[in-house]
Amino acid sequence: MPYDRPMYDLNEKMDLDPNNYKAWVLGNQWYPPPWVPLFVDHHYCYGKYGMQYGPEVIFDPRTKGWDWRFWKGGFYLSVIQPTEEEGKKREPIWREKMRKILENPQAVWDKHKIPMRKEIDRIFASDLKGSTDIDLCDHWMETWHYGKKVEEAHFEPMYALGSGNITFRKLLKQLFNITSANIEYSQLHSGLDNEYTTIVDKLARIAALAADMGLKDTFKEPDAEKLLAKLASDKKGKEWLDKFDQMVHEVGYMRRRGLELATPTWWEDKTLPLKDIQRYVNEGKTTAGNLDMKPELVKRRKKLEQELLNKVPSSEREMFQKLLECSQASHIFSEEHTLYVEMMFFSALRTRALEFGRRFAAKGMIDDPGDTVFLHHEEIFHAGIIQERCDLRTLITRRKNEFAEYRKLEGTLPPVLGDPTKISELVDADVIFSVSVAPPIATPEEVGASLVGCAGAPGVVEGIACVVGGEEDLDKVIPGTILVAPATTASWTPVFNVIKGVVTDGGGYLTHALIVGREFGIPAVVGTQEATRKIKSGQRIRVDGNTCRVYILD
């Protein structure tokens, strides 16, 4: 019974029955195992709801969304498919909803994003330390249950805009024989406004300020804590730290791992952004690569858009334009929602859990303020007022031990539970599966490459590979190398400003490495399935994002 919750567990008799679920896929691309109990609690409570809300609100005829199980620390997903009769009833409603969505695709995200930003800003403005225990309980439950709205914002645009992306890809193939693996597809989805990548611009600007103030030599100090001390002891360093602190105050909700509650925010650990800035200063990267590339990317995109529109039959031109805009909106949403959902909202939850932790630890209920992530949300609430009557240490120790056992299983969990031959049916049935999980376009043997992916960001680059296992290893990324990883998420974006290329095991047509690689002008190949197994750090490799191929050169 994972974390004392029987509903998380896999029921082999029911769940592995192909009449109920085709197969279960390990969600390593989004959720590298394991998770702490508090995050699993939230994702079961509202994440799962959102996964089913998204397709239901648009009456998707192919899927009712995802179900999930927490098995041996791994997060396994499957698709709930409507019956044939249900699909027929849903289709005309879905078509009418999609017709309205195509009139203004960006509005599907904006209608959630704008009020969500206002509400999260209000939540962040709360005086937690000055709150009474009763007020803190109110803050906790209010923020926790706001998760329902957040997950609606997470998944309605994902399914609505994702449906448009799939339809556009089909039309592009039909009219021009262009697939998502072709350069033209990348060009059509490059140079788009993306709020998340402004974080890189903020880091680059503060790095440029350090260089302009003559602090380059100071930033050669390799230890981040010692660097802070050196800056604090110098007049110019103090001036720079004031600007740095202003930036951290503004965007301190950033963390290294978005979909989790156990990782510290920049507010808690200023060395996290400082390490990125230090890397920029030492490498002379004092501008954001995506902004440097943007004018040229926009120019190419608009030119190609016009060329293709001129070739589209007049009877289909309006629909082509609408689907193109919807597909582009899906790429913008794919990155921006992580800023709001995974960074801002989960950081708001974390700050409240930590304030309870501070109070609980002061009264001897727990050993460390961070231990609240090993509780469930109602356990925190129930202990929130008369705190001295609760001792949560035994419960926390037991869950920590369970978490440690799951950590031992990392890298050993099967990628599929059930029949792996059914994965293609899941991909065909569900929008998110189809844009996030895709097979390589060929086998390495067929094309004479070491690895082949499912999609690429254009360009060819040779260099030294730097294999990274997860967010905890981001400090090990060597500037000027080619990043090789199981997957990348939005919290990895700052390192794209210093790398030459990227290769991932997982990914699909809307994966992070692909979208951000295009914006930074970095060749990328995603969805190779086995890059981290075949490539070793220090090897020279060639990444051909134009053909989705990777070559190990030594």
Image: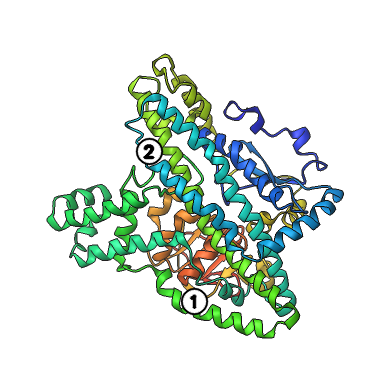
* Residue 552: x %, y % from top left: 54, 68
Quote the CA–CA distance across marks 2 and 1: 41 Å
* Residue in the foreground of this view, choosing between 223 and 513: 513
Q: Residue at x 86, y 50 (%)?
A: 84
| Display colour scheme | rainbow
Secondary element type, mark 2: loop
Mark 2 or mark 1: name the one nearer the start of the chain: 2
Q: Residue at x 42, y 20 (%)?
A: 385
* Residue 135: x %, y % from top left: 41, 28
Q: Which mark is residue 12?
A: none
* Residue in the foreground of this view, choosing between 173 and 502: 173
* Residue in the foreground of this view, choosing between 304 and 504: 304
Q: Check the picture and name the quadrant holding the N terminus.
A: top right
Q: Which mark is residue 297?
A: 1
Instruction: Report the residue marked by disc 2.
Output: 126
Q: Residue at x 56, y 83 (%)?
A: 303
* Residue 425: x %, y % from top left: 77, 54
Secondary element type, mark 1: helix
Count residues near mark 2 (Cα–Cα under 10 Å), then give few for <14, some for 14-19, many for 20+. Answer: few
Is residue 83 visible in the rendered structure shown here?
Answer: yes
Q: Amino acid at mark 1?
A: Leu
Looking at the image, the residue that sits furthest to the right is 85
Q: Quadrant of residue 41?
A: top right
Left or right: 476, with 485 as reference point:
left
Is residue 533 visible in the rendered structure shown here?
Answer: no
Left or right: 133, with 142 as reference point:
left
Which is in the foreground here, disc 2 or disc 1? 2
